[in-house]
Image: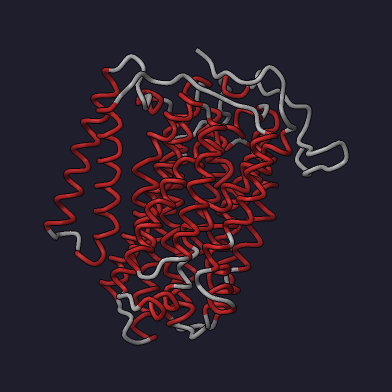
Amino acid sequence: MQITGPTKPRASLGWVLVLTAAAALVVALDQLVVATALQRIRADLGASMSSLEWTVNAFSLSFAALLLPASDLGDRLGHKRVYLTGLIVFAVASASCALAPDVGVLIAARVIQGAGAALISPASLTLLTRATPVAKRGAAMGLYAAVMGLAVVGGPLVGGAVAQGIAWQWIFWINLPVIALVLPLAAVKLGEVKGTPSGPDPVGLLLSAASMCAIVWALVRSGPAGWSSTEVLGTLIGGGVLLMLFIGWELRRVEPMLPVRIFANREFAAANVSALLLTASLFGTVFFLAQYLQVGLSYSPLDAGLRFLPWTVLLFIVAPLAGRFQDRVGARRLISVGLLLQGLGMGWIAVTAHQHESYGATAVGLVISGFGTSLAMPAQQATAMSSTPSSSMGKAAGTFNVLRQVGGALGIAVLAAVFAAHGSDRTPTQFASGFAAAMVAAGVLAGLGALCALFVPTRPGRTDAGNAPEVAVEDLTIGPKENLGVR
């Protein structure tokens, strides 16, 4: 049972990379683009801070809850079809966010936006992986990871620039021209790719969505409600029980929606867990650093966003090079060293915040962290996908993205709890104290990820996932003369 595709390629790998990365850019950007625009949204819509948190959380909840069902849908109907549908849903939701008259409508639109993102993410990753020969996968994944990393740490810059220079609504309007350009090109250029669909599984669908929703809900509510609250403990325990029921149910199925046994593959499991911990460290840092630059160092939203540039530029430059390097030195070294550098960078920022240093000292930590993240991200992504059989690739992509979303929510929740225990937002000094403690927590998360990376084999084996016979390509070029520089 193999993934099927067109008998001959519809486009060069360069086009596949550009189109899938562009969609991933829009999705990743919208996860944290509101971070530096929250104060403007609050003033315009008359919203409370607790309700504003849900402009981030609502997206994460629907995204995480629907990723696995969306992955199975791609295997069943075709990943190209699901990818195109996701773009349309995301565009409609983005327009609804921009037109929202109050925070309630904005939150509802963000839920729909998360659903569109759930359709796009695993489909785009599967389309790219299936189009990439093993020899070029590290380089392609490096570029793809660079785009996603650029979006995550560049989100505050875009949000701050747009909110301060135009209006906060434009952080959502800017998605539309990108999607309007990508949608027709993808319809023409991309070939269809299907996997081995599971049979109808309404029980698995319900259990997976409910468990992810409950777990992410508990994580995002742990800060305001407290870890010991009935709400958080109840939903966390309930989510864990539902997750165990889902795993047990899938293990009994002949064609499961999630092939749980792929986690017996040490390579796949280690790559996914280390990616969860890196995302936790990264998302938590971006969320709180955007606030620290404004509250603690008194920068405007635009100026705060600009201070992310050392991190952003390094991701865009180093990640593609690291993707190439992976093919020579192996993923374990890149992931473990990258996560150690991420942890070191967070520790440096914690020290500078505790001593009330200027931004110049903080920037050193951003450079260290940016270099580390650039090494680890493409290696994690390529390892998770390359260690997976072709027939399970769509589900593996969904699993990888689910764990990243859970990691993002976990990171923000853990750092919020640490921040609340050591500081507050009442004064810049109190904020700096809480922020410094939160950065230590971010460093610890990265360090745990580095330990997980040690379980990745030094020289990962190759599965049939890398052969890609149905979407054969000659090179990474868009046309005969336009080269993406990936060899």
> Is 136 on the left or on the right of 441, as rendered?
right
> Is 117 on the left or on the right of 255, as rendered?
right
- Residue at position x 30%, y 24% in the image: 201
In the rendered image, the vertical position of residue 332 relative to residue 159, given as above or below: above
- Residue at position x 53%, y 57% in the image: 29
In the rendered image, the vertical position of residue 383 relative to residue 340, given as above or below: above
- Residue 124: in sight, yes or no? yes
Q: How far from the left and from the top, in percent, is residue 460?
A: 56, 28
Given the current orientation, which residue lies at the most extreme left position? Answer: 230
Which quadrant holds residue 361? bottom right
- Residue at position x 53%, y 41% in the image: 380
- Residue at position x 30%, y 77% in the image: 423
- Residue 361: in sight, yes or no? no
Q: How far from the left and from the top, in percent, is residue 289?
A: 46, 71
Given the current orientation, which residue lies at the most extreme right position? Answer: 481
Q: How far from the left and from the top, in percent, is residue 163?
A: 53, 75
Compare residues 469 and 177 and report the one nearer the observer: 177
The colour scheme is secondary structure
Q: How many marks?
A: 0
* Quadrant showing the C terminus: top right
